[in-house]
Image (cartoon, rainbow, N blue to C red):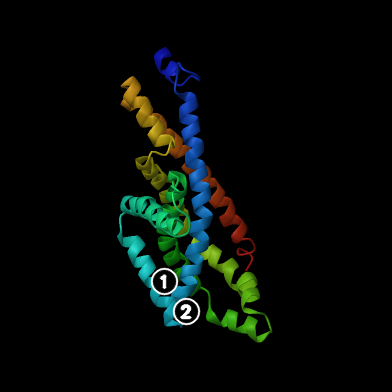
Amino acid sequence: MGEYLQYLSYGDAGWGDELLYGMSITVRLFVATLPLGLVLGFLIALAKRSDKKWLSIPANIYTTIFRGVPELLTLFIVFYGGQIFIQMVVEFFVDDVIVDVSAFLAGMIALGFVFSAYASETFLSALNAVPQGQAEAARAMGMSWFRTMQKVVFPQVIRHALPGLSNLTLILQKETALVSILALDEVLRQTQIAVGNTKEPIFFYAIACGLFILLAFLTSIAFKKIEVWSSRGQERA
């Protein structure tokens, strides 16, 4: 038992500081990706719901691509393909400049694209669950489109979309581990390094599982509070 506690100590003697640093990278990647995916997913849902084909067709193609391509392949395409594309653009203006795209940024963009594709379907279902007559009544009263979305439609969309978004958020947390393949020092990569040095796979992978479960538990609590907030006044109705 003392040997395992030694493994979790700080400094050169243990791996506690490395695991906590990896967990901080995982949390930062998750926190940076979630708003990107939510905003992009909602905009895509609006585009898919639009009567204009130049909006709905590209939006449907977008969701088909990012829901169909494996997340790991999307990571590789964004990381390597994005780096090549940016390098070509930079070389068009400036010579002898090397572009290096960080694994964190590539992971955030790739996971944000995938998350937004799935979230758009959740938002689309939530939008369809809001009676169209409410928006029409608000517009008839002189409210602008933005004001109608803000005061009438969006609060109801959030309430309908929360269960689906909660599940997608937990999936996003797990998918952050994929970015370890790009050598980002998140918690799974730090765990793999610790396993390679100590030859204690069961112990360190169990610690990694516990850290992800803790993050999922905290996220579930946050979503529960949001659900209570979004449903205020519903029981009295």
The kind of secondary structure element at disc 2 is loop
Residue 65 drawn at (x, y percent): 33, 64
Q: Quadrant of the N terminus?
A: top left
Of labels 2 and 1, the one closer to you:
1
Residue 119 against residue 153 in the figure, above or below: above
- Please, is residue 62 above or below residue 84 in the view? below
Spatial CA distance of label 2 from label 1 is 10 Å
Name the spot of residue 72 as percent of width and height, x first: 32, 50
Residue at 45%, 45% in the rendered image: 102
Kindly identify which residue carries mark 2.
50
Q: Are marks 2 and 1 in contact (CB under 8 Å)?
A: yes
Residue drawn at x 45%, y 69% as measured from the top left: 125
Q: Which badge, 2 or 1, comes first in the chain's sequence?
A: 2
Query: Label 2 neighbourhood size at 10 Å, few (<14), some (14-19), many (20+)?
Result: some
Residue 228 in the image: x percent, y percent? Answer: 59, 55
Amino acid at dot 1: Ala
- Badge 1 density bin: few <14, some 14–19, many ≥20, Cα 10 Å: many
Is 175 left or right of 43, judged from the image as shown?
left
Q: Pointer 1: what residue?
A: 59
Residue 180 picture quarter? top left
Q: Residue furthest bottom?
A: 140
Residue 90's disc number? none
Name the quadrant of the C terminus.
Answer: bottom right
Taking the view exactly as shown, the residue that stands out farthest to the top is 2
Residue type at mark 2 is Ser
For residue 92, what is the image quadrant? bottom left
x, y (%) of residue 73? 31, 52
Q: Is residue 146 visible?
A: yes
